[in-house]
Amino acid sequence: MSIIVIEEKCKGCGLCVQGCPFDAITISDRLPVIGAACTECGACLENCKFEALQKIEDGAVRENDISKYHDVWVFAEQRGNKLMPVVIELIGEGRRLADEIGCGLGVIVCGENVDQLAYEAGCYGPDKIYVADAPELKTYTTDAYTKVIYEAVMKYKPEILLLGATHIGRDLGPSIAVKCGTGLTADCTKLDINPEDKKLMQTRPAFGGNLMATIVCENHRPQMATVRPGIMEKAQYNREHSCEEIRLDVKFEENELRERVIKVVKSMREKVSLTDADVIVSGGLGLGGPEGFELVNKLAARLGGVVGASRAAVDAGWIPNSHQVGQTGTTVKPNIYIACGISGAIQHLAGMQESKCIIAINKNENAPIFEVADYGIVGDLYKVIPAILNVLDGLE
């Protein structure tokens, strides 16, 4: 069961807010918003003189109201007022989906003093930019971002909402989906539009990557998905592109937010940016031990790249999981990917096979990695890599 608002009947009188014993109802743009604290006690139904609130079976009204939902939205994740790379990928994919459906593309930006950020996002091709600017949004918190985006979704009704499958996206997506009463497909690697009914077909790995499942949200809106970074083509930047900017009315009641960010402490660990790397040198079990990554690191440093790893090497404790490439790690698409001592399990291949140039080094000439490699070297990596380094040194 759930409580829904019949917008056509609502007068914005606020009696439902006054009568709610759980403070679960707020007013936004003269319409009540039912919050997560609602217990469906029915007190608001008794207080409403206009029959603008109704208790219904989950999905009963939404199934009939999905025609009110339109447009594709992308959540513009930012940190320190800097767009995350996955946002540019999502805008590019959102543009493709919107064109197939025949609707508009919107981007929602949250933060404090984000005018420049909104301008930058607008240069990647959306039709509309929705801007939520408030001090409470400077640093990401689940409560604040969920409230703002949920209220925007309820007002403007996008039919599709895309988020990056990042730490923030994986936290925010489910929270919004629960409040909206809709579904969420996590960690998608492919999105398509059904040509017959225009519904979003969301594909993600299942059973450890051995199968790919395609999921459709039939009767609820918005259709929500988190998308794995490094999968989609990035949108093209165009400084001359113009789009409509819509400022969202952001208001927080006193003590409404359950969490505050007191201080941000950056990790002292070495940062790994696999998604943005042009060159990745990865090591697997064929290294024989953690000391093998010293050699891998030398080659990566010499080529101006970063160090990756197979899941087996991570599970063995040889290297932190932030370096993991593959179906259950980071999906990458660098210009050059060098696999050292990696056999090429299907889960690893799924995360790097879109690289522009793949070079494999392995003693086993029958290793599956050679099936996707552009260049293969059969040999002992402890002899091959030093030889490569010597050649590179000779080129200086």
Image (tube, rainbow, N blue to C red):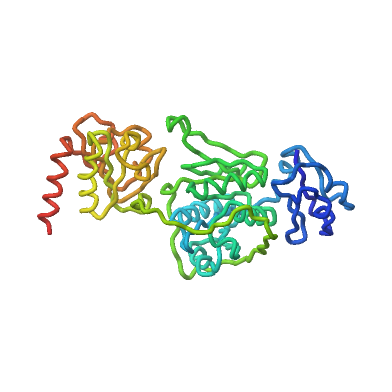
Left or right of 42 in this view: 291:
left
Closer to us: 293 or 7: 293
- Please state the horizontal and vertical placement of residue 169, each as a whole percent of the image: 52, 49
For residue 244, above or below residue 356: below
**Which residue in the rendered view is the most extreme toward the left?**
394
Q: Residue at x 31, y 41 (%)?
A: 319
Numbered-mark total: 0
Identity of the residue drawn at 67% across and 64% down: 249
x, y percent for residue 174: 58, 44
The image quadrant that residue 129 belongs to is bottom right
Is residue 272 depicted above or below 343 in this figure?
below
Q: Is residue 277 left or right of residue 157?
A: left
| Rendered location of residue 304, percent (x, y) | 25, 55
User: Who's the residue at 69% across and 60% down the image?
Assistant: 254
Q: Position of residue 258 (x, y in %)?
A: 63, 52
Q: Is residue 188 above or below residue 367?
A: below
269 sits left or right of 396 in the view: right
Q: Residue furthest right?
A: 49
Give the residue displayed 53% in from the left and 50% down from the top. Answer: 163
> In the rendered image, is residue 131 in sight?
no
> Residue 265's quadrant in the figure?
bottom left
Horizontal relation, residue 270 to residue 161: left or right:
left
Q: Is residue 348 visible?
A: yes
* Front position in the image: 211 or 273: 273
Quadrant of the image containing the C terminus: bottom left
Identify the image quadrant of residue 292: top left
For the residue pair 383 and 118, the one nearer the viewer reads as: 383
Q: Quadrant of the N terminus?
A: top right
